[in-house]
Amino acid sequence: MRVLMFGWEFPPMASGGLGTACYGLTKGLKNQGAEVIFVMPRVSKDVTSSHVELISAYDTNVKRSMREKIDEIIEIDSPLTPYMSNEEYLERKNSLSSMHMSEEEIEHSRSDASNKIYGRDLYSEVWRYRQKSMLIALRKDYDIIHCHDWMTYGAGIEAKKISGKPLVVHIHATEFDRTGNNPNQYVYDLEREGFHAADIILAVSNLTRNTVIERYGVDPSKVITVHNAVEQKDSSMLEHKLPNKTKVVLFLGRITIQKGPDWFLYAAKKVLEHDPNVTFVVAGSGDMENFMMRKAAELGMSKNFLFAGFLKGDDIDRAYKMADLYVMPSISEPFGITPLESMRNGTPVLMSKQSGVSEVVRHCLKADFWDVNDMANKIISVLEHAPLHSMLVAEGAQEVKRFTWDTPAKKCVDAYEKALASCRK
Amino acid sequence: MVAICFYFQVHQPFRMRNYHVFDIGKDSNYFDEQKNKEIMEKVARKCYLPTTRLLLSMVREHKGKFRCSFSITGTALEQFERYSPEVISIFRELAETGCVEFLSETYHHSLSFLFSKKEFHEQVDMHRKKIEWLFGVTPKVFRNTELIFNNELAIELEKMGYKGVLAEGADQVLDWRSPNYLYKSVSAGIPLLLKNYKLSDDIAFRFSNPEWKEHPLTVPKYVHWLNQVNGAGEVVNLFMDYETFGEHQWEDKGIFQFLEHLPREFLKNHDNSFMTPSEVISSFPIRGELDIHHPVSWADVERDLSAWRGNPIQEAALKHLYEVEDSVKMSNDEKLISDWRKLTTSDHFYYMCTKWFNDGDVHKYFNPYDSPYDSFIAFMNVLKDMEHRININVDSTISQDKLENDNEVDKTMMVNEVS
């Protein structure tokens, strides 16, 4: 079976759940005997030639490891990254152009090179990506089309039109999840278009499946839940110890409304009233980063808060390892792979009940993200009761071994077959 | 001839509310009164009231030939008194017929035998007094919490003067032997009645399971199985939770009709009879000796202690609970002691069990918490608050002493002045 997949760059180049899921899933699909032609947006070398270090690391290591998993990689020159906002898009585009410009040219950056190549805003870039992908869909030979989240749905729809092959769309996060229920109409419409054009929809949790059915008016019979998994790797050799003796509670993820960083702050405030010797580490970046710093100071917690910035690669594993507890207070988390990563690193997890991962993980603590008292109660309990902590560590490490990518990959293959069968009818 | 010995366990714990770390030192109401009331009222309506009324009519119908036994925990009795006193009056009526035996156990359905002999004796005494006061009878036969039994318990019970004890007829204990005789442990002479788990669980667990190949279970079929014991045993011990009737097996599945018809069919054979545990002990000889070193129980497939002592959080909670026993009792604070005792109920540790993550879901059905970890957290927070109360008591005792000493000084001074 040949799969034309419209996905996203793999870690460590890309951060976040979507690239990680694409990586794990393609690896699992390979084990299931499927061939994958992987199409992804990536800024072409010519435009970012000053990114020497990044590019070389990418080309030598990552690409090689990608090649091992994927039969063919096709890059479409585009600065798109998963879940970027229009503002983030403009920022990235401008920073790309500034790299091969003199100081004076930056002053007049409106007429720069990248503006000629890339779309003037996010939406026109997504449209451009859709058009570009048609060429690939025309030239390649494949049995099924599989695409990941809204920016790639257009590409998938066009490929289906061109080839007549069945379309499987994978939903990792809906616009409702990302925006805290304030969807952008353009994005919503594109998601809806993708869902209705699809033969099968794969949702990363029952929570997401329900959202798809209820908010996008989709026939339930074509929506299948495929819970994510986590890469099974051993990072036990990593150096990670902090010199100080205070307990560490970790937030790791995009610092944006969907991830509930503000609820982390309010729970921290409660914890510190009970025990002032706790350090809260916030790892990640995002639009609420400044708010977090300001608010932590406002609540008198500056000395208990550490902002680690954006982490990648081994540093992510190190962050989990130095923590006594990882908290994922997301207000709406379609799945959430990070708790599994934390468990793999031997760190207990407190996750919001409003997450897909909470449907499948048992050896962890769960709370409603808005129930600050309960969140704090559970944070304090893990830090205070050694048997609770050690049991969550031991049982969690065992449990996470069940979540290999072979399981979701197997379900994908089943879904492909179902889609092919229904198209043949 | 075959005798059936029915024993029904009646128990309700005082469930705790989701007690937070922020409640410590501020709020010492640990128990979820609303939930306990609701559950008691529901189970009384579905099981306790209709089943006890039915048993009463069966005793009358068979003019003393239908007999059975109960063990009712103190925590259940207290909640009957509080939320459903009618249940107590029907049990009284049943007691007055003389066809029903009440067994002895720990008042709080606790694991105290395994952790504190002192507390074990105190709870057994409390329970005996409660049964005497409510039903006017003194229990002579013992059953330990969840049928937990080992050689050591036999010795202890013999010293306490019990006539007999009930236990699980677990495979690891009986091996090739039949549960349908009276046994004793190698350690003491006290007679041992062993549960016939196959025939008991046919009613208690499998009765309305459509997947079971014997479903539906009819009275003639069941009585046929019982009659087969004839010649290969003397007594069939049918031990089960009382909540089997109407709560675990529903009325619309015919469980009440089954119970009602059972004696009619069974007593058709005039050699058959129903006996209470005391009657079994006085009617049959001890046929064998069993060496039960490791405790057995009637819980789960393992039939050991792993439902309550199977993981580190259960052990930590139990250890901590019994560590504070002495200081709780020395406080002489009645309310504190009573609260502490309610925590000894085995259910609290059952809620912390993580075995069911891998297999059956029986535990989840009975668990008022979302997760075993949540129940541990609430339990430990409550213990923390108790320690806080103990310290307050200690402080106030010290200041009391100090006050009295100061008074002494004053008096001496006065005496001096007078002289």
Image (cartoon, coloured by chain):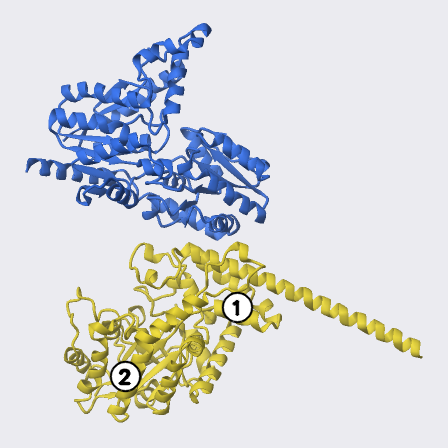
Chain colours: A blue, B yellow
Q: Is residue B346 above or below residue A207?
A: below
Q: Amino acid at mark 2?
A: Leu
Where disc 2 sits, the SS reads helix
Task: Write the residue at 59% across / 71% down.
Answer: B329
Chain containing the residue with disc 1 = B
Task: Write the residue at 33% across / 28% down.
Answer: A82
- Residue A4: image location, x then y, percent: 19, 27
Mark nearer the N terminus (2 vs 1): 2
- Residue B128: image location, x then y, percent: 46, 83
With B231 as the anchor, is A348 left or right in this view?
Answer: right
Real-space CA distance between mark 2 and mark 1, rounded to the nearest whole angstrom: 36 Å
Where disc 1 sits, the SS reads helix
Please report contact status of discs 2 and 1: CB closer than 8 Å, yes or no: no
- Residue B90: image location, x then y, percent: 36, 85
Badge 1, how many Cα within 10 Å: few under 14, some, many 20+? many
Q: Nearer the viewer, residue B4 or B133?
A: B133
Quadrant for residue B139, please give it.
bottom left
- Give a yes or no on whether discs 2 and 1 share a subunit: yes
- Residue B146: image location, x then y, percent: 37, 71
Q: Nearer the viewer, residue B311 or A95?
A: A95
Q: Is residue A328 above or below residue B292?
A: above
Q: Is residue B200 above or below residue B373?
A: below
With A383 as the anchor, is B304 left or right in this view?
Answer: left
Read off the residue under disc 1: B340
Task: Write the residue at 84% across / 75% down.
Answer: B411
Q: Which mark is residue A400?
A: none
Read off the residue under disc 2: B54
Quadrant for residue B395, please give it.
bottom right
